């Protein structure tokens, strides 16, 4: 079970890196990259796996923290989805939408560290 937890945590970190890294890479000309969209999905799926593994084990789950992080991630996922759809159609991505993806991901990381 420890190995599965480590794999899920690794994938979770990769998703966070894709979200924040893509945001920082396009900070001057904001857009939403495909890797940010993929990173948001990786964060969601691996986060659900991590919570499920913790529930199955002897660990304590802070359900309020998980709920807050889930809502923030869903906001980032929706923003990334809308941004990618605009990019595929050739429409400009608004600065606020592009910064919402990275900003919400950064907020989620801060909550994970400091809460």
Image (cartoon, helix red, strand yellow):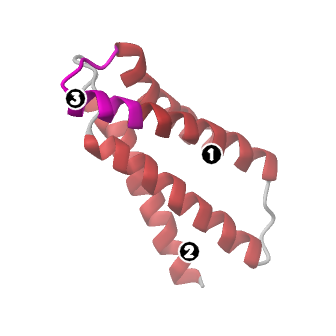
Residue pointed to by mark 1: 112
Q: What SS does tag 2 mark?
A: helix
Instruction: Report x, y in % for residue 27.
Output: 28, 22
Q: In 3D space, how far apart are the residues under numbered discs 1 and 3 (Cα atoms)?
A: 35 Å
Q: Residue at the location (44% across, 46% down)? A: 40
From the top left corner, tell me how far across and down residue 48 is, in percent: 61, 61
Residue in the picture at 38% in, 41% down: 19
x 56%, y 32%: residue = 107
Marks 3 and 2: which is nearer the front?
3
Was residue 85 drawn as part of the magenta stretch in this picture? yes
Pointer 3 or 2: first along the chain = 2
- 42 vs 56, left or right, is left
Label 3, label 2: how many angstroms apart (C-alpha)? 38 Å
Locate the C terminus by quadrant: top right
In the rendered structure, which disc, 1 or 3, sits on the residue that comes first in sequence?
3
Question: Is 80 one of the magenta-colored residues?
Answer: no
Image quadrant containing the N terminus? bottom right
Foreground label between 1 and 3: 3
Q: Position of residue 99 (x, y in %)?
A: 40, 22
Residue that mark 3 sits on: 89
Image-based side of 86 in relation to 63, left or right: left
User: Where is 113 relative to 97, above or below?
Assistant: below
- What label does residue 5 carry, if any? 2
Q: Quadrant of residue 69?
A: top right
Tag 1 near tag 3, CB within 8 Å: no
Q: Residues within 10 Å of mark 2 (few under 14, many from 20)?
A: some
The kind of secondary structure element at disc 3 is helix
Pick whichever, 87 or 105, lies toward us: 87
Q: Residue 94 occupies which quadrant of the picture?
A: top left
């Amino acid at each position: 079970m420890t190995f599965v937890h480590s794999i899920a945590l690794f994938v979770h970190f990769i998703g966070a890196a894709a979200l924040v890294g893509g945001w920082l890479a396009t900070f001057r000309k904001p857009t939403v990259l495909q890797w940010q969209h993929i990173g948001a999905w990786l964060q969601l799926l691996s986060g659900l796996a991590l919570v499920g593994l913790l529930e199955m084990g002897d660990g304590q789950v802070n359900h309020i923290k998980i709920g807050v992080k889930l809502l923030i991630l869903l906001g980032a996922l929706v923003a990334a989805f809308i941004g990618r759809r605009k990019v595929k159609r050739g429409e400009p991505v608004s600065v606020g939408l592009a910064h919402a993806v990275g900003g919400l991901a950064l907020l989620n990381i801060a909550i994970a560290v400091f809460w």
